[in-house]
Image: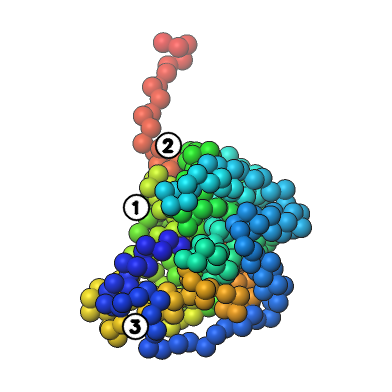
Amino acid sequence: MLFRSLVAATALFAATSAFGPAFAQEATPQAGDRPDIAAGAAQFIKPTNAERTQVLVGFLTTLGFTPEIQTFEGGNQATGPMEGANVVVTVGEGDKDIVLTAHYDAVKLRDGTLSQGIVDNVGSVMAMMEAAKTLDMALEGQPVAHRFVFVFTDQEELGLLGAKAFLAKHGKDRIAAVINADVAAYGQTVMYGENNGPQSAFVLETLRGLCAERGFDCMPYPTYPPSDDRAFSAAGVPVVSMGTQDAVGAHQMWLAFNGGKDNGLKEGFVPPVFQRIHSTEDKLSYLKGVDVARFGLFIADLGLALDKKLVEIQAKDAAVAAETAPAAPATTPGGE
């Protein structure tokens, strides 16, 4: 998740530091009954993002996929030129794509070391792999109209560079919708943004319907912190960005971004998630495997629901076109 959005939010609290002490601390979650997810997440703790790439490729290969590594010229003014690498796997077939994204790079800290990047964003990566595995199995007996393209992006922390590179290479014409996941290592409240343009209305409608059907606690954010979704919405592509937290943390973050000056938070209060990401506190102990798995299944269900929704929209549009098409001229016997 891009740090500059968090700086803007914490300014609302008149705090002297984005990572200053909070007035309340929640209990540290522990890995739930999916220790395999916690063990997998631990393997991403590496000194470089290039090593994280290899971990990701290894995981996807083990799951039976053939990952494609798409390199691009990245970096920014602070880093200088730096090669990036998006990792892409495809599930199913279709003329249009439902793209599912999560960035796997971690931010470099002020001392030059790399954050563990578990909350931001290994939890989402593990959830996306859970979704990819689930969809791959589900599609064996369930035909769909779209391909599911999983894109694990690099250099999100440098300015959404991986997402922009993928969009430039892939083009937007094939993309029917995008699901982005960022900051999703623990908690069962699904947070999602509503600020990705009118073209994303059907995605939000589908998401809300799924939340109701599954009985999930889903929290809409009129203003949601930027992630890779912004690269797609800027291009006019339908997209939603989601994350998870515990219910209290999700409400605190909602107030930080949407509550304005009179948000009800105590002066100087910094929501715990703000203290964790982009810091040495973004560590494995916060990941809860059962929550990550639950979110992964939710992502898979949302992908299938969007496939169905898009087919319905296409059928409706075709029916409207048929109704408004001019009638063919009548002919008489003999062609007169």
Question: Looking at the picture, which amino acid does disc 3 mark?
Answer: Phe
Image: 130 above or below 308: below
Question: Looking at the picture, which amino acid does disc 1 mark?
Answer: Pro
- The scheme the figure's colours follow is rainbow
Q: Earlier in the sequence, mark 1 or mark 2?
A: 1
* Res 131 seen here: no
Position of residue 92 measured from the top left corner of the image (x, y, whole percent): 66, 48
117 vs 145, nearest the viewer: 117
Query: Looking at the image, which residue is at 35% across and 75% down?
Result: 17
Position of residue 57 measured from the top left corner of the image (x, y, whole percent): 69, 54
Q: Label 2 crowding class (10 Å Cα cut-off): few <14, some 14-19, many 20+?
A: few
38 vs 246, nearest the viewer: 38
Q: Marks 2 and 3, how far apart in space?
A: 58 Å
Question: Looking at the picture, which amino acid does disc 2 mark?
Answer: Ala
Q: Secondary structure at mark 3?
A: loop
Q: Quick one: quadrant of the C terminus?
A: top left
Q: Earlier in the sequence, mark 2 or mark 3?
A: 3
Q: Which mark is residue 322?
A: 2
Q: Are marks 3 and 1 in contact (CB under 8 Å)?
A: no
Q: Are marks 2 and 3 in contact (CB under 8 Å)?
A: no
Q: Which residue is mark 1?
A: 198
Q: Which mark is residue 269?
A: 3
Q: Marks 3 and 1, how far apart in space?
A: 34 Å
184 to the left or right of 25: right
- Where on the picture, by quarter, is residue 83? top right
Query: Looking at the image, which residue is at 55% across and 85% down?
Result: 28
Query: Looking at the image, which residue is at 40% across and 44% down?
Result: 235
